Image (cartoon, grey):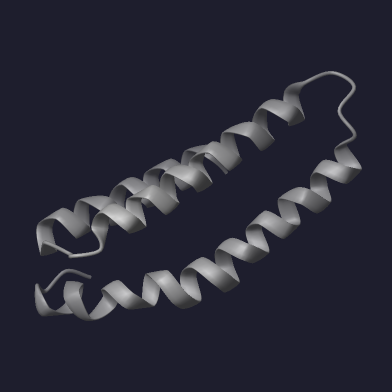
Amino acid sequence: LSEYSHIHFQTEETYFVQADYEKRSVHAAIHDQMRRQVTEIAARYEKPGTDRERLFFELSEFLYNVWIWHINSFDREYVPCLKAHNIS
């Protein structure tokens, strides 16, 4: 999850620069927040004594928020800009 999210966010941010997306700073800041959350969840998973059942529910909530909130709102906003620059 950590590696995938890093690659995914970096790819999107590269597209934002190529397309001169006007909201790229705001979107990148949201990515930074999500990167920190993923890093924190991964670190807690590795820590001895972690309540992994609770962590599973926190991870599930995080993933739900990413998929429902982030993708369905923020990610949809940049699609027209990227399409206008022939970036897919």
Looking at this view, name the residue that lies furthest to the top: 48
- 64 left or right of 36? right
- 52 left or right of 30? right
Q: Position of residue 24 (x, y in %)?
A: 25, 58
Give the residue at x 11% y 79%: 84
Quarter-wise, where is residue 39 in the image? Answer: top right
Residue 67 higher or lower than 63, as above or below: below
Give the residue at x 33% y 56%: 26
Give the residue at x 86% y 37%: 52
In this orientation, which residue lies closer to the viewer: 27 or 53? 27
Give the residue at x 34% y 51%: 28
Quarter-wise, where is residue 63 in the image? Answer: bottom right
Q: Position of residue 83 (x, y in %)?
A: 17, 78
Residue 56 higher or lower than 69, as above or below: above
Q: Position of residue 44 (x, y in %)?
A: 74, 29
Quarter-wise, where is residue 88 in the image? Answer: bottom left
How many marks are shown on the rendered structure? 0
Specify the quadrant that holds the N terminus.
Answer: top right
- 54 left or right of 65? right
Residue 56 higher or lower than 36, as above or below: below
Residue 31 higher or lower than 47, as above or below: below
- 3 left or right of 81? right
